[in-house]
Structure formats: structure tokens, C-alpha cells
Amino acid sequence: MFTRYFSVGRKILFSSLLLGLAGALLAGSLQMMIFHHKRAEHLDNINHDIQTYLNGYFSELLNTIDKLQPLTISPCETVAAELTSRAAFSLNVRAFLLVENGSAVCSSATGAMNVPMKQLVPQVDIAKKLDIEILPGTPMMPQKPAFALWVRSPLLENRGIFTSINASMMPWLLYSSRQNQFSGVALVANGTAISTFSPHPLPLSMLKGEPVRTSKISGVPLSVYIYGDAWALESIQFSLLMGAMCGILTGLLCYYVLSVRLRPGKEITSAIKRNQFYVVYQPVVESESMQIRGVEVLMRWKHPTAGEIPPDAFINFAEAQQLIVPLTRHLFELIAKDAPVLQKLLPPGAKLGINIAPAHLVAESFQQDLKDLSAMLPANYFQLVLEITERDMLNQHHAIKLFEWLHHEGYEIAIDDFGTGHSALIYLERYAFDYLKIDRGFINAIGTETVTSPVLDAVLTLARKMSLVTVAEGVETQEQASWLQQHGVNFLQGYLISRPLTLEKLVEAHSKPEKYFTMA
């Protein structure tokens, strides 16, 4: 499981690049959508403003024309003054003309006249009730485009009002400074357009492109066309820049997160938080009576995807990653949690064997960690036995003082896996141990003709001379148990007695010992 940490660099880099690209596409797309939405809103607002303005303007103008219709039956001399006054107070109106029988008979600008409408404005169809045309100019102002509006009298035949209107009054001029939002505005009547693209009226077909917004003016056959590019260049550039920046930041963030998440040791820290570790207890029996006198506490790890992780793998890994101290503290918490049940299963004075790594022994927090564990356990019930491996050298000066403190506080010390390291005899000479746990390698040699058996004899003789209590690990056969009993080994531990059991199995074994214990 842990070897994968040394081959994830490329995966992290590749994943970060992919996520960065996805982040760039997403951020750029979102920014484009935002710009598009804002641009659409702005175009809608412009279109609405122009339409609202023109609706109001022509509504007021048509209302004024309705009031002028009765003047068409009066002589020009009697109504000219009022006609002129109305034109003066009507915004952007060049002139009002009274029309009778197809001829203009009175003008607000020139007074009495008699000019056929076909001659004056041939584009306007006076047969219609209402018509509007765009003219390149009027007789009084030939170089300035104008709107020609005809409204026939609703009551009197062959009579009506003709109005010329300045095209310069159109509100597109108010928006001419906003060319980054749209390219132009056109007002269209009967296929002719007056627009911001040209100072002169043009056929609608000569305007390039399709309008992005269109609307109709109420009351008159006039339409508003708003032109613009599908996407603004500045918006595209900004979106690309935003996408690139977000992609880089996303890639870097993903690289950091994935590196931290897949960093060696992160799995163990996460497993502690998620309560993936649990405790099993392997019974230790007295050789003579074969009665349980204690248990060795062992930690196990059930990974949600990898399953059961071998203890040697994660313990050695935790030591290498300097996580053995928090891992052991977690073990203490799990033991304390089980202690009330263990108290019911084990006799008073039962020994709890706990493996302690050398790195924890030299930690500043070690003594306080032990005190905290003792405070969490039932008072004066269990005897804690700290099992220390001799595969790693200890600082002699520090270890001697530490062992003195441990004995003073009532803890017992066992040298674990004796004979597997490089410093076994040195350890026995330097430090005051209470127990010597014989490695299973020696036990497996019992009954075979190997050089190991004489060594085991020597180890047992040495233990007796040093008054050390001996515990045989890995006892699997009755032959091994009998040999150890005959040679004075004090305690036995191994599959012959029992496999390591969870707390639930230990409770069941207490009620049905014959199912779990060979000696039952």
C-alpha cells in the first residue's frame, strides 16, 4: 500500500494539469457567459430606452396632430398662427402642413400654399390612414434627413395633416459613445433606414449584418434596429485571461492538495481521525496453571479500500514518518475505552502488555502520556507492562533515568523479541528489565536439530541468573509448550493458547473458553 507514495508524482502532475485545464475552460466559459448576459442586458436596456422614448414622442405628436385635424376645414389665414404656434412648441417638428384634396394648402413655416403632395413628397402615400417615410431632406433643409409623417383625418375625406420631423432628434446620438457595446442603431420605415452608419438615408438592404435587437414603435410603422457583434473582442480577451489565470491557480491548488493528501503519513493521520484503527488482545497464560494472567495489546488497521493492513507495515511506516507518538496515543485511548469491559474479564493485577517504540520513549511527552493512560484506567487494577524492542539502540544515559522513573511509578518493563537485534546482551547488561520475551524464532526451533536450541537454553539460563521473568512468544504446538514448561519458562503466548481477539471475541471467549482456548 505504502509503495504507491513513491510513484504518485506523475499522477499528481497529470491530474493537476487536467484539473487546471478543466478549471480554465470552466472559468473562461463562465466569464464569457457573464459578459454575454451583461451585454444582452445592456442591449435590452438600450432597445427599451429608445423604444420608450420614441413611443412617448410619437404618442404626443399624434395627439397634437389629432388636435390639428379640425383646422383643415378653415382658411389658412385664420389658422396659420395656431399652426405655427403648434410647430414651435412641438419638439423637433420642422413644419405642420394642412392637406386638402391631395394638396398642401397651409404650412406652419410658409403660410398659405397650394402644392400637390405628389409633387412635394412623392414617397408618402396619402391614400393610407397613416404613413411615414424617411426623406434625405426637406425644401427648407435639403441636406438634413427628416421623417415625413402623414395622418389622414378620421372624419373628413381627402383631408389630413402632414408633418416633417428632424431625424437628428433620435436618441441613438445619446448612445454613440457606447460603441464597445454595439455597433450602431437604425430607424427603419418602409425599407429605408436612417442610421448611425451614414449621415444619409440608406435602403435597409445596404446595412451590413443582422440586428441583435429589434422593436416596433407604437402608433406608427417605424422599427428600431440595433446592430452589434456577437461577441465583444475585449470580452473574449478578458475571458481568455481569466480562464488562464484560474486554470493556473486551479492546477497549483490541486497539485498542493493532492500532494498533501497523498503525502506519506497522511493516510495514518486520516485513519486516526476516522477511527479505522482497532485493538485486539492476545492472552498470555501462566505456564504451570495455564490460566490467563494478562494480555498483549495489539493495534490493527482496517483500511476502507485496502482492507487489513499488516501491523509491521503501518507501524514501521509510522516510525519512519514520525507518527508513532500520535499513533500510540490513539492506542492508549482505545485501551482506556475498552478498560471497563476488560476489568470484568481479567483478574485483578492482570498485565496489559503494550508495545512502545523507542521514538516514543525519547519524546518529551512520553511520561505525561503514560500518566494520562493510567488516569483513564480503573485505579489499581491493571499492571502495565511496557514492551520495548531492542532492535533500535537507546541513549544509555536517558534510558537509565527513564527506566528508574518507570519503576518508581509502578510500571514494568519487558524486552521484546529478545535475540533478534544487534544489542541483546548489551541491553540486559545496561538496563533493569522485568520481563524477557523470547522471540518466536527460538520457539519454532524446539524439537528440531538446529543450533538454535542450545542458544535458547543459554538464554533461559541467563534469564534465571538475572532474575528475569520469561515469556515465550509464538507458541503453536503442544510439544513447544511442554518443552517450555519443563525448562521453567514463566508465561506462554501464541496460537496454541489463542489468536489475538477483538474485545467482542474476548467477551465471548470468557463465556465459552472451550471455543477459543486450547487449554480449556
Image: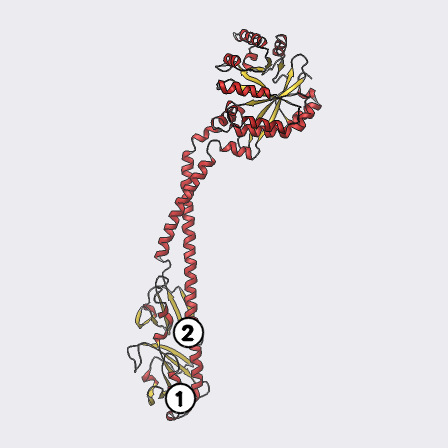
The quadrant of the rendering that contains the C terminus is: top right
Q: Report crowding for label 1: few under 14, some 14 to 19, many 20 or more residues within 10 A (C-alpha).
A: few
Residue 450: assigned label: none
Residue 9 visible in image: yes
Q: Earlier in the sequence, mark 1 or mark 2?
A: 2
Q: Which SS class for mark 2? A: helix
Rendered image quadrant of residue 480: top right
**Along the line of sight, which residue is nearer the eye, 370 or 504?**
370
Amino acid on which the number 2 mark rests in the picture? Leu
Amino acid on which the number 1 mark rests in the picture? Glu
Vertical order, 152 against 316 (above or below): below
From the top left corner, tell me how far across and down residue 58 is, in percent: 42, 77
Q: Is residue 506 rendered to the left or right of residue 74? A: right
Vertical order, 477 against 143 (above or below): above
| Residue occupying image coordinates x 56% and y 22% | 355
Q: Which SS class for mark 1? A: helix
**Along the line of sight, which residue is nearer the eye, 349 or 76?**
349
User: Residue placed farthest to the right in the image?
Assistant: 511
Q: Which residue is mark 2?
A: 54
Q: Report crowding for label 2: few under 14, some 14 to 19, many 20 or more residues within 10 A (C-alpha).
A: many
From the top left corner, tell me how far across and down residue 208 is, in percent: 33, 65
Rendered image quadrant of residue 281: top right
From the top left corner, tell me how far across and down residue 394 is, in percent: 49, 19
**Along the line of sight, which residue is nearer the eye, 369 or 297?**
369
Residue 304 visible in image: no
User: Residue placed farthest to the left in the image?
Assistant: 143
Vertical order, 416 against 225 (above or below): above
Vertical order, 264 against 60 (above or below): above
Rendered image quadrant of residue 77: bottom left
Q: Which residue is mark 1?
A: 82
